[in-house]
């Protein structure tokens, strides 16, 4: 509305100025209110922008961590497999040590002249060590060894050899020539 329109309505010039002044105050008040609302909305917008930026930053970080976690999970799995393999190897070495120690004790018990001979003359792949420390498949092989190779054991050599019927020979040989002549007689 213009001043002329207010004057045409019958208002005086002072009244028209008062209407404009009042209208100006209403406009200023509404502008201040709109400005405050705009500032509030702008602050909310800025807060949301910051939140969005923070979420995007976190998302990138989480994506990177997820990739790192996948790497860590792969490394962890690799380490677990290596640990499992090392445990199996340790158990095998421990079993071999127990087997060898028990076999050495058995060799001492059997009174072998050379305890290492026990492992050389037996088929150890057919021998197993039980949980109670005894052997399975060893006794029969040891009996065969004692029968066929008694010289490996301490003590008297009995089976298979009986020189001169267990007696002192009747003739005495003084030289090789005499022995050859006695042989061909």
Image: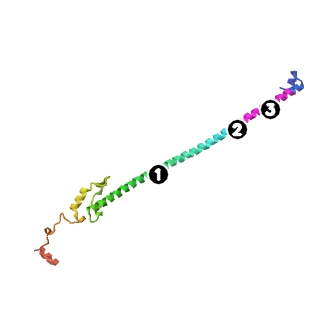
Numbered disc 2: secondary structure: helix
Magenta-drawn stretch contains 28: yes
Residue 140 lies left or right of residue 165; in this view the side is right
Q: Between residues 14 and 153, which one lies in front from this camera angle?
A: 153
Residue annotated with mark 3: 28
Q: Which span of residues is magenta-colored?
A: 17-42
Magenta-drawn stretch contains 110: no
Residue annotated with mark 1: 79
- Residue 105 to residue 29: above or below: below
Q: Is residue 120 visible?
A: no
Question: How many callouts does the rendering have?
Answer: 3
Numbered disc 1: secondary structure: helix
- Residue 105 to residue 50: above or below: below
**Could you tell me how far apart the alpha carbons at marks 2 and 1 are, in whole angstroms?**
51 Å
Q: Which of marks 2 and 1 is nearer the N terminus?
A: 2
The residue under the point 57% across, 44% down is: 62
Residue annotated with mark 2: 43
């Amino acid at each position: 509305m213009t001043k002329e329109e207010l004057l045409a309505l019958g208002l005086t010039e002072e009244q028209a100025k008062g209407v404009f002044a009042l209208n100006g105050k209403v406009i200023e008040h509404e502008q201040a209110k709109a400005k405050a609302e705009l500032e509030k909305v702008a602050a909310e917008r800025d807060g949301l922008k910051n939140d969005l930026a923070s979420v995007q930053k976190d998302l990138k970080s989480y994506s990177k961590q997820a990739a790192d976690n996948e790497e860590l999970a792969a490394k962890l799995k690799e380490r677990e497999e290596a640990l499992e393999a090392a445990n199996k190897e340790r158990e095998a070495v421990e079993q071999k040590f127990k087997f060898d120690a028990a076999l050495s004790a058995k060799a001492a018990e059997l009174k072998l002249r050379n305890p290492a001979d026990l492992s050389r003359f037996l088929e150890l792949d057919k021998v197993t060590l039980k949980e109670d420390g005894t052997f399975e498949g060893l006794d029969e092989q040891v009996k065969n060894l004692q029968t066929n190779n008694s010289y490996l054991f301490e003590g008297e050599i009995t089976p298979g050899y009986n020189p001169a019927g267990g007696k002192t020979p009747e003739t005495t040989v003084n030289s090789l020539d005499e022995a050859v002549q006695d042989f061909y007689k």
